[in-house]
Image (cartoon, grey):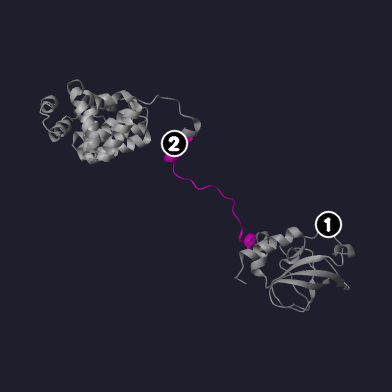
Amino acid sequence: MFKKKALMASSLSLLLTAVGAGLFTPVLAVDNLDDVGLFGSITVTRQAREAARAVKQNQWPTAMQAYQRAIALDPKATDLYYGLYNAAAHVGDWQQVSVALEAIFQEDPSAKAHLLAEYGQCLASSGRLEEAIPVLKKALLTVDADANYMPDKLRALMVKTETVKEVPKRELTQAEKDRMIAEVTKYKPPTRELVHGEDVRGDKSDFALTLENAYSSCEFIGICTYEGYTKADIVTFYHPPVARFHIDTILKGPKLNREMPVRFEFHDKTGDEPPKDWKFSDDKMPKKGSKWLLFTEMAIPTNGAFETYHGNFGRLEATDTNLDKIYKIIELHRGQQ
């Protein structure tokens, strides 16, 4: 058919019509198996087969899109560009026809001599007539010899597409077996140790002993200097002396009298028993002039002294590390005071 029309080359339009009429697609059965095929990839094979099914049903836009996806997965699969060319030519998308031909020529330079008619048609249809005319004239000289070149490539592509090649079988790894078992096994919540309600009470639990909780619970936080303590007749583990502090810097809370009496607890009020043979002495108190971070839940004294948050937990040495911790929390809560 192509030969007969090519001989009627009295005008360029007749020649272009002849080239266009030379396109055809063989009809082959396409299996829907999930295998790597001759493309060596399940996903590429799947897209190529989707394109082949669309070709059989003359759904050319669908075929073109499927070939584009397959090529995106494997740009080096030159034979897929023949499928893209065929589908794009049927759609009339000459930009994609040009992409397909240029890729074919790049991967297989020898193919260009056999596809002059197709190339000339692409140039002419793209409005590049001056370039198309010499190519089409040259195509006339080899039209008989090259008439079956494109159809043979398309037929070979279809055969390759429908060829089944199973993925080599291998032993599953233990991780894969475990994952498969987990997917079909009913979910079982992890066993957790029961926690008694008393263990999470804010006033008795160790869970409350965090600087974040201290910051949120306290009306006053300040950097203070220890100046000494008021001696009492009886000082025990649960009956501490009153320490005298001077407020140097207020980090949170209202302005208070700079002289701050504080109940100097020796425990954190979570029910801990006193150490064996514990007895009060001056060495249980800080060094005079030392700097401390004090946290008090209320900004007013109770019974003549301020109560620190959870006893001795609310009294930290004002080291660089401890100061940095509280400054970090203050920064996080900036604007919420």
Q: What range of the chain is rendered magenta?
A: 177-203
With respect to residue 127, does 15 lie above or below? above
Q: Residue 331 appears in which quarter of the rendering?
A: bottom right
Question: How far apart, in angstroms, are the residues tagged by discs 2 and 1?
Answer: 57 Å
Q: Is residue 208 left or right of residue 160?
A: right
Look at label 1 and name its amino acid: Lys
Identified at 64% across, 68% down, the residue is: 216
Residue 132 in view (yes/no) = yes
Of the 4 image quadrants, the one containing the C terminus is bottom right
Say which quarter of the image contains residue 153. Answer: top left
Residue 132 position, x and y percent, is: 23, 34
User: Is 197 covered by the magenta stretch?
Assistant: yes
Mark 1: few/some/many CA within 10 Å (<14, 14-19, 20+): few
Compared to residue 202, the image places residue 155 above or below, namely above
Residue ID for mark 1:
276
What secondary structure is marked by label 1? loop
Amino acid at pointer 2: Met
Q: Nearer the viewer, residue 206 or 300?
A: 300
N-terminal label among 2 and 1: 2
Residue 151 drawn at (x, y percent): 21, 26
Q: Which mark is residue 180?
A: 2
Which residue sits at x=75%, y=59%?
Answer: 320
